Amino acid sequence: MGSQGSGGVPLVQAPYTVLLLPLGTSRQDPGAQSFFLWLRRMQALEREQDALWQGLELLQHGQAWFEDHLREAQRQQLHLGALGENFLTDLHSEPGRPPLAQIQKVNICLQNLIHEK
């Protein structure tokens, strides 16, 4: 991905391999149970990492989206300010703009995720 982690260390998405070793003991053996629990935890961590990578990619696209819409809103504000009281003569519509409530909902979801402990 080429992203930077904390401390400027580059984040690398690497493939992984799961190795299954046959155990010559019964399922009731503590060693077999321990191995099974370890393997299950490893798989859960791999799924979590996959979801985090996907989230990071979405955040990068989201940041670009927010920056584009912020610039457009600033441009429109400058345009409206330049029109002054004559703004009613400008019938320029604003199609495709996301509703403010939707943007605020996304912001709240991100804030809740980031501040969750």
Image: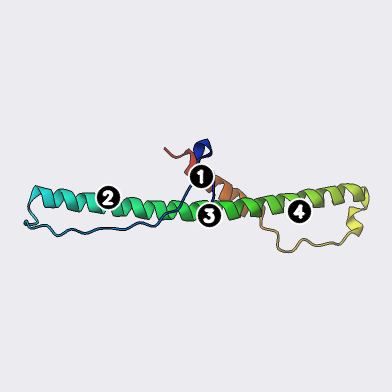
Q: Is residue 67 left or right of residue 30?
A: right
Which amino acid type is shown beneath numbered disc 3? Glu
**Residue bearing the label numbered 3:** 57
Rounded to the nearest angstrom, the CA distance separating label 3 from label 2 is 24 Å
Disc 2 marks a residue whose amino acid type is: Arg
Mark positioned earlier in the residue sequence (4 or 1): 1
Image coords of residue 109 (percent x, y): 52, 48
User: Dot 1: few (<14), some (14–19), or many (≥20) neighbours within 10 Å?
Assistant: few
Q: Position of residue 63 (x, y in %)?
A: 62, 50
Nearest to the observer: residue 43 or residue 96: 43
Residue 3 drawn at (x, y percent): 54, 48
Residue at label 1? 10
**Is label 3 in contact with label 2 (beta carbons under 8 Å)?**
no
Residue located beneath label 2 in the image: 41
Q: Of helix, strand and loop, which one carries label 4?
A: helix
- Amino acid type of the residue that numbered disc 4 sits on in the rendered structure: Glu
Q: Nearer the viewer, mark 4 or mark 2?
A: 2
| Residue on which disc 4 sits | 72
**Of 49 and 11, the residue lying toward us:** 11
Identify which residue, 64 or 11, lies in the foreground.
11
